[in-house]
Image (spheres, rainbow, N blue to C red):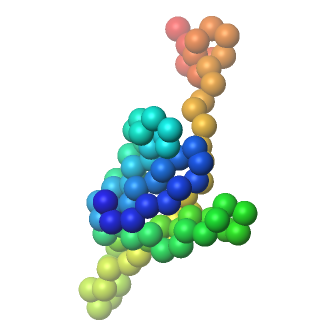
Amino acid sequence: MQSFVVREPHLILVGSNSIEVRHTPTGRLLQVIEGKEIRLMQAVPKEQGPILIARRGKTDDQNGMSSDQLVELVPTAPLESSDNGFVWEEWGT
């Protein structure tokens, strides 16, 4: 891993091919985000702005230069299932 950001309760480790999100108190791995040529662009205190990541894009321009994607990391939450255990009721059998 090349860089990191602490946003309690998470530790975000940024490497060239992946981002790991870990629970700070336990070190437990919560999520892995894969990519190519990932770089931490901006990490400011939570009150002052987002965490910005750049990664290699999927397309090249007419001169062969590869594109970059600029991505903001935002917290996500798991989907909650309905009472019968199905996330999408119409798909239940």
Q: Position of residue 29 (x, y in %)?
A: 40, 38
Q: Position of residue 90 (x, y in %)?
A: 62, 19
Image height of 30 relative to 86, above or below: below
Q: Residue at 35% of width from left, 84% of height from top?
A: 61
- Residue furthest out toward the front: 25
Image height of 26 relative to 58, above or below: above
**Snapshot quadrant of residue 3:** bottom left
Left or right side of 81 for 15: left
Number of labels in the image equals 0
Left or right side of 33 for 81: right
- Does the rendering let one see residue 59? yes
Q: Identify which residue, 45 or 74, lies in the foreground.
A: 45
Q: Identify which residue, 23 or 38, lies in the foreground.
A: 23
Image height of 45 relative to 33, above or below: below
Left or right side of 43 for 22: left
Q: Position of residue 5 (x, y in %)?
A: 50, 60
**Quadrant where the N terminus lies?**
bottom left
Q: Identify which residue, 22 or 85, lies in the foreground.
A: 22
**Snapshot quadrant of residue 67:** bottom left
Q: Residue at 27% of width from left, 86% of height from top?
A: 64
Q: Residue at 70% of width from left, 69% of height from top?
A: 48
Q: Position of residue 40 (x, y in %)?
A: 44, 69
Image height of 28 relative to 51, above or below: above
